[in-house]
Image (tube, rainbow, N blue to C red):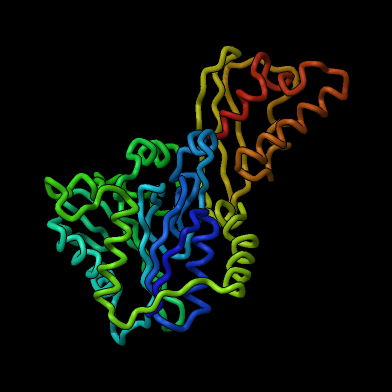
Amino acid sequence: MLYINDTCTDPYWNLAAEEYLLKSIDEPVFRLWRNSNSIIIGHYQNALAEINIQYIKDNGIKVVRRLTGGGAVFHDLGNLNFTFIEERKPGEDTSAMFRRFTAPIIEALNSIGIRAYIEGRNDLLIDGKKFSGNAICIHKNRILQHGTLLFEASMDKLGAALKSRPEKFIGKAVQSNRSRVTNIKEHLLPGNPYGITDITSFEAFLSEFICNRYPNIERYTFSGEDNNAIGKLCAEKYSQDNWNFGSSPSYSFSRTVKFPGGLVELYMNVEKGKISDLKIMGDYFFTLPTDEFCKKIIGTEHTHDEISKRLSEIDNHIKTQENPLGISTYFNNIGQSELESLFFE
């Protein structure tokens, strides 16, 4: 078994590395890695239904789609991720896979006096609170299972980043379970007899435990060839909006906002990440017809950058027609930034 302990904290890179290790390395792999602030969504999830888009934009949080299924999770440097990649055993179902790959983690925590256990399909709990979510992907005869280990993660950021209003989105994707969560650090024994004080010492402990459990394990550092292949996958796939957002299932979105210029109700459908239908209603005043505005928005990607860009184009076009009000001619006394906010939670 190869042991890879990464220092890179770029979520785009790390998720690209997961795919590379699954598909391009033949040996069994154990990996420890961390991400800077990010939301990692399941392969078939609707990204925009899972995240607080304004919060992640304001706080520079990356959103990355992974290969594995399951729900959205928040990563920061207080969370340690682990990955096992091995061959699939004949007749082994996913429940057995989860038990096999989480067993070493449970054993490690039990060894320092923390009663961790698996519950349900893929969660690890302490005292009824979740500290680890796990997910699986199968490629040919190889299995990748990875999971989170919340050690000293920011619970405030976790809650804010994943906060959404499900009634606003109607889609086929699985919504993440807002389970009660906990940090491992809160459950360390009084007096800290094992000397685990922070995420770094916890990572060192887990690394030593796994190396002792698998005596034939050998440390592995990515080669230049590995890095080039991962970098290419990162640039062409994992850092791209069409993977992270465009793969989102079709969904409907609605929002009603009371602006100084009047009440505005927005209803839209999104297909493959782009607005396919848009209806805006309300008691606002207008100079140009709203239907005309909606037609100009249809086909735009439902992301902050693309909506902002399209609104600016419409605003500039109207102003070139010697109308200083710009986009406000469609919605009197409602500005571009207010209109942009209407498209997002």
* Residue ID at (80%, 27%): 316
The residue sitting at the right extreme is 321
Viewer-nearest residue: 342 or 15: 15
Q: Position of residue 200 (x, y in %)?
A: 34, 53
Q: Position of residue 202 (x, y in %)?
A: 29, 55
Residue drawn 64% across the image and 45% down it = 301
Q: Is residue 289 above or below residue 218?
A: above
Q: Is residue 268 left or right of residue 317?
A: left
Which residue sits at x=68%, y=15%? 332
Q: Quadrant of the N terminus?
A: bottom left
Quarter of the image for residue 262 reads: top right
Vertical side of 231 occupied by 176: above or below: above
Q: In the visual, does 177 lie left or right of 65?
A: left
Camera-side residue of 164 and 55: 55
Q: Is residue 283 above or below residue 137?
A: above
Total numbered labels: 0
Task: Locate residue 305: give its quadrant.
Answer: top right
| Residue drawn where x is 39% and y is 73% of the image | 3
Q: Position of residue 244 (x, y in %)?
A: 55, 54
- Horizontal and vertical percent position of residue 212: 25, 74
